[in-house]
Amino acid sequence: MIVNTKWLEKYTDIPYSPEELEEKLTYLGLESKIIENAADRIEGVIIAEIQEVLPHPNADRLKICRVATGSETLSVICGAPNVMPGQRVPLARIGAVLPNGMQLKPVKIRGIQSEGMICAEDELGLSDDHSGIMVLPDNAPLGGDLRNYLTGNGISIDIDLTPNRPDCTSHIGVARDITLLTDGELRIPAINFQESDALTSDFIEVEIENPIGCPRYAARIVQGVKIGPSPQWLVDSLLSVGQRSINNVVDAANFVLLETGHPLHTFDYRMIVGKKIVVRSAVDGEEVVTLDGVRRELNADVLLICDAEKAVAVAGIMGLENSEITEDTTDILIESAYFDPATIRQGSRYLGLQTDASYRFERGADPDGAIYAMNRLTDLIAELAGGTVTRGIVDNYIRKIEPARIKVRFQRVNALLGLEIEPQWMVTKFRKLGCEILTQDADCVVLKAPGWRPDLEREVDLIEEVVRIYGMHRVPNAREMHIQPNYEEPLNYKLVEQLRQSLANFGLYEVYNNSLVSQKHTGFGPQKLTPVPIRNPLGKEMSLMRSTLVPGLLQNARYNINRQNNDLQLFEIGFVQQFDRKYETHAREFQRYAVLLTGYLEEKYWGFERRAVDIFVLKGLLIAIFEKFGITAVEFQPSVHDHFEILIDINYRGNMLGYFGMINKTYLTLEWDIEIPVFVFEGDLTTLLENANLGKSFTPLPVFPKIERDISILVKENLKIAEIEAIICKNAGEYLKELKFYDLYQGKNIDKGLKSITFNLVFQANDRTLLDIEIDDKMAALHKILKEEVGAQLR
Amino acid sequence: MSLLEDIHEVQRQLQHDLSQIDINAQSVENLRIKYLGKKGLIAGLFKDFGALSSSEKPEFGKALNTLKKTAEEQIKSLQNRVAEQDNKGTSFDYTLPGYPFRQGRLHPITQTMNRICDIFGEMGFGIEFGPEVETDFNNFQALNFPPNHPARDMQDTFFVDKDILLRTHTSPIQIRTMLKTKPPVRILAPGRVYRNEAINPRSYCVFHQIEGLYVDENVTFAELKLTIEVFAKRFFSKDVQLRFRPSFFPFTEPSAEVDISCIICGGSGCRLCKHTGWLEIMGCGMVDPNVFTACQIDPEKYTGYAFGMGAERIALLKYGIDDIRLFYEGDIRFLRQF
């Protein structure tokens, strides 16, 4: 909503500068921003009149203009095609500064001195128009300062209105809010027109078929009007809030809309068949052509204004072409109605059409204000376009809208706000708002809200008014805060944050991905969930809720690889959804965590060889994560899937913790355009936390020395390390405390089909110092068993 | 003076010189010449020694040898230190970079949300979560958004079904919490939310919100102001000024927007604050009685406040980021900066 200070001053005095007004309105809940006026930057340009236009002796296209400023006559060279004697024009004299910073200097053009410049709009920074010089109205004051002339119409302020304030879609409404601060009077324009003897009811009858959609419909006729241009004040007023003048009648209706906030409609009475207005719901599939020339198909949500035969307007949204005011209209039917907000909103949404009218009706117009607005428009039309006004209003008000009666307890106001405001101050402000005080005693007041404030329904709505008018910024902070004891540790939340921090500490970067994805994403991987579909997506690429985090990470990988960053260690923690009608929300939600590794762990560096990521880097990372949560001895189970070169399921006590693997090369190239190996993991966070063993207990530290031994053997290359470890553990006896695999070698000096492997064994007793000899015996026995069971050769 | 006294005198002198010496190649060489040189003090003593009778020799010989040995050792040690210094000076390069320790980073949104949760956590707010796919009841109706109300336009919604949608704010967590817990309730509700808005530098269809809710007897607007001010000063800077101005949210009344004085220009006006001097950081207000009624809480007995902010917006302001899409691209060059 744009308001103009000069316009506002018609209704109340404003003792503030524009900047003060901007701030005060904002503090009242009307978030305001002064609209900068381009004319503010023009300096030294005056209004002059062209008296004579003479040809330039040395150039066909240039002219010498004799220009009067009121005090002198200057000679100015001008090349504009539209320059003519008698025009009032902006004249930049020597020394003037134009908005682009250019300062005018005396100059000779083709041998003739020019004492200034007649400006086009673009040269003044007012528009991009350079088709000709700017021509001002004939009444522009000769010799007057152009900036003062152009900004004399007040300062315009853009208000970002909240949906609860339909009253402030009007200048009177905003002026009323200003009086709350100034305690000044609100001046509502008086109505002056005379009615003729012709009865309105002889010309029109109103029938409301849908009283839910249209509780009130009032009509009146103005006969014998003359459509023509609007007077300058009206043109200027509309222009000051960014609206173009059309003709006197249409402009008057727009003016009253912006003045009172009540949308009105004017019909050419000639086009209304059968002296009748019928308000009804549209029929599914019914078609109309609206004022903007668009053919629109309607449905039953749309409310129509019809005559005896046809539709003439889409109620509360837009009129139709078939009944619009034209140059030769003489008799006008004025509509001023109250339409139901929800009905208008439904219709407006169905048509995808929001207008000044629908914007106001769907927020709640003033059912009582309909009559004043009608009279005000009648008055303006009679004044501007002549004509006679029929006697009386046909006012069909079949469903009365009653403003709320509200009891406000003074103590409650102060208790909720934490203030101590005098009851009388509150009552004074309620009156200023337009409330009618019904009863009042020491504790409370009962009042009736004004029709223009449909948002005032309950006590708390008035409490809001009190703090709004008092000024939220003036409410002092409380001195104390009331903190509730919390006996419960928010465990899961903390654990998730710990996991996040651990992954970052392990060197991974956290990413966030869009959870609205395409089928390519939801179709990924071994754990396919039915995705949750979005009915009204932004596009096909974002039509499903994600069901796995890995594709998001693959997308990140491609994004970075395309920017020459191949070394990526990424993770994401987030929710995925599964479509399932068994749930209230049709969705089952899982919290997941996922990792992606590519390239090298370290950047190129001196002093060590950097490690390329592989499946065992990822496996080690996962084991470290699980250990953080007290989960040791997880089971790794090989699995198979088209999208994976290597795929391993991770199980713990019968629960699947997740899967990890290396993405299939072909799939990666075809679907993701990635040419380097990619390793991924995805796990279920809830399962991890449910299986976490977080209780920690102390084991006494060993007091007796340990004995370490290595065992190096050659075995068949297809023998699994885990199998050999199992044999060692089973046979090494009770003193084996640790068993660590630490070397694997194949190649030179090792026969084909064999591999050399080395373990480190730590022996320790809790009650005595072990003897070397007994461990030597143990090791010899182990060698023998390994030889017997798996054919191991000692190295 | 007997030779023994001379030996002791040289001994004392040596110790004195050692304690005074400024160690470098020249001074150590000078010291060596002074004591161990061919014409040095110790050589001089040996000359005197040669003149002694054979009966005197054993007694003085032992003392003299000890002196010589001590001098040799101590001067050798000094020579070593000089050599060491030289060595370092030539081949040890302390400017070589240290080996990199691997480090990852938390996403800036995580860091922002964690900081916010920490500050409110210290003010006694617990953490609650809720699902991203929600019912119309929890997301709108219980929060006092009537069907077909223009307030719903403020939050363009993705629908899964007629009454099932992607939550447009984390406020449904308020409803879920109040339905299962009786007051007092003091919670923070962080989470991912969705708005059906085209993706551009200023808006993204997915973002994160953190909401707070406090419900008890005698909760006032003045206490809400205190709580928000403590948060804003701790999160941004203790110098920021706050501005509460009336606004509208269906689920709070009175409702307010909170602005802070611009963290770049301090209020004088700059590009970040669009020359207003203020930055909008959150919305808040007193819980609307209709919300209490929807949660079967007596609005006469209890009052409460709620506040909510967008983590992305806060992070944009805090880090001076100019494009919200950067949060969702996973660009490693971006992530490394936080």
Image (spheres, grey):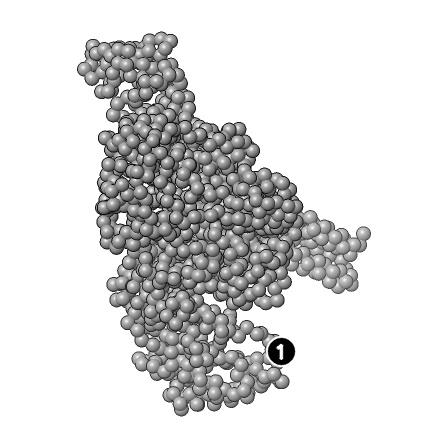
A340 or A550: which is nearer to us?
Answer: A340
Q: Is residue B12 left or right of residue A693?
A: right
Query: Is A147 rendered above or below residue A581?
Result: above
Secondary structure, mark 1, is loop
Identify the chain of the residue marked 1, using the numbered disc in the image: A
Q: In which quarter of the image is the C terminus of chain A?
A: bottom left
Residue at point 73%, 57% (across, down): B49
| Residue A7 screen position, x and y as percent | 43, 30
Q: In this view, does B149 lie to the left or right of A457?
A: left
Q: What residue type is labelled 1?
A: Pro
- Which picture quadrant has residue A789? bottom left
Q: Can residue B322 be seen in this view?
A: no
| Residue B182 screen position, x and y as percent | 57, 64
Residue at point 51%, 45% (across, down): A449
Q: In which quarter of the image is the N terminus of chain A?
A: top left
Residue at point 42%, 36% (across, down): A372
- Which picture quadrant has residue A168? top left
In the picture of the structure, the residue carrying the numbered disc 1 is A700
B51 or B64: which is nearer to us?
Answer: B64
Residue at point 37%, 16% (across, down): A141
Q: Is residue B185 left or right of residue A162?
A: right
Q: Can residue A267 be seen in this view?
A: yes
Query: Is A699 rendered above or below residue A331?
Result: below
Query: Is A747 rendered above or below residue B272?
Result: below
Which residue appears farthest toward the top when viewing the image?
A72
| Residue A251 screen position, x and y as percent | 33, 32
A467 or A311: which is nearer to us?
Answer: A311
